[in-house]
Amino acid sequence: MAKYGRSPDDLKIMPGVFPVVGRTQTEAQEKFEALQSLIDPVVGLGLLANHSGGFDFSRFPLDGPVPDLPETDGGKSRRVLLIDLAKRENLTIRQLYLRIAGARGHWQLVGTPQQIADQLEERFVNYGADGFNIMPPTLPGGLVDFVELVVPVLRRRGLFRHEYEGTTLREHLGLKRPAGRFATHAEAAE
C-alpha cells in the first residue's frame, strides 16, 4: 500500500534519535543529568499539555502521580503512550516530563559510543530503520560528540558511509526530484 503517494519500496523510515554521548557511561549520565536540570517545570508541563491533548497538569503536584486523563478530541496516540509509560513505571508528573523533554518523545540514548552504536545497529538490522535523524542534545557540542565518537564506530562496522553518492539529501536517499510547480508537462514526465 502506497503511503504519501509513494510505493513501499520508496518509503524511508528514519526515526529521531536523541543521543547523549560520553567517553564513559558515567560521563554520559552526568551530561544527561546536567541537561535534565535545565528543564524548567513550566516548559515540562507545557510539553505534557501538548502531548496530552491540552490537559492542564499544573493543577497537580509535580512530584505526585500522573492523574487519569479525560478523553479528548486531540491526538490520542501520544496521550495513550504517556499514560501507559507513567503507569508502567510509576512516574510522577515531573519524572514524566523529564522523560520526554529532551528527546521530545523520540528515542533517547545515553551512553558510550559503543553502547549507542550497538543500539543503533540493533534497530537498523532488526527493526527496519533506514537511517536515523540525529537530534543532538546541544549544538555544536552534542553533534560534535556524535560525529567524533559514534560515527567512527559505525564506520568500522560498515554501517556508516565514508563518502556520499550525491550532493543532496534526496540523492543520498535515492529519491527522485519532484517536478517544480512551473515545470512543463513534458519536463514533469521525465
Image: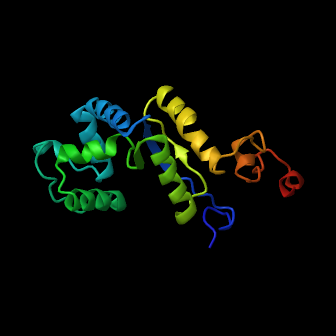
Image position of 70 (left or right of 10): left
Front-lying residue, 48 or 118: 118
Q: Quadrant of the C terminus?
A: bottom right
- In percent of width and height, residue 16 lies at 49, 48
- In percent of width and height, residue 123 lies at 51, 58
Colour convention? rainbow
Q: Residue at x 65, y 68 (%)?
A: 8
Label total for image: 0
- In percent of width and height, residue 155 lies at 64, 45
Among all residues in the image, which is located at the extreme bottom? Answer: 1
Image position of 145 (left or right of 68): right
Identify whether 122 is placed above or below 132: below
Front-lying residue, 8 or 154: 154
Q: Quadrant of residue 6?
A: bottom right
Among all residues in the image, which is located at the extreme right? Answer: 186
Front-lying residue, 111 or 16: 111
Front-lying residue, 68 or 117: 117
Image position of 26 (left or right of 70): right
Among all residues in the image, which is located at the extreme top? Answer: 140
Q: Quadrant of the N terminus?
A: bottom right
Q: Residue at x 79, y 44 (%)?
A: 182
Quick check: can you spot residue 50? yes
Q: Residue at x 44, y 43 (%)?
A: 18
- In percent of width and height, residue 132 lies at 55, 49
Quick check: can you spot residue 70? no
Identify whether 188 is placed above or below 8: above
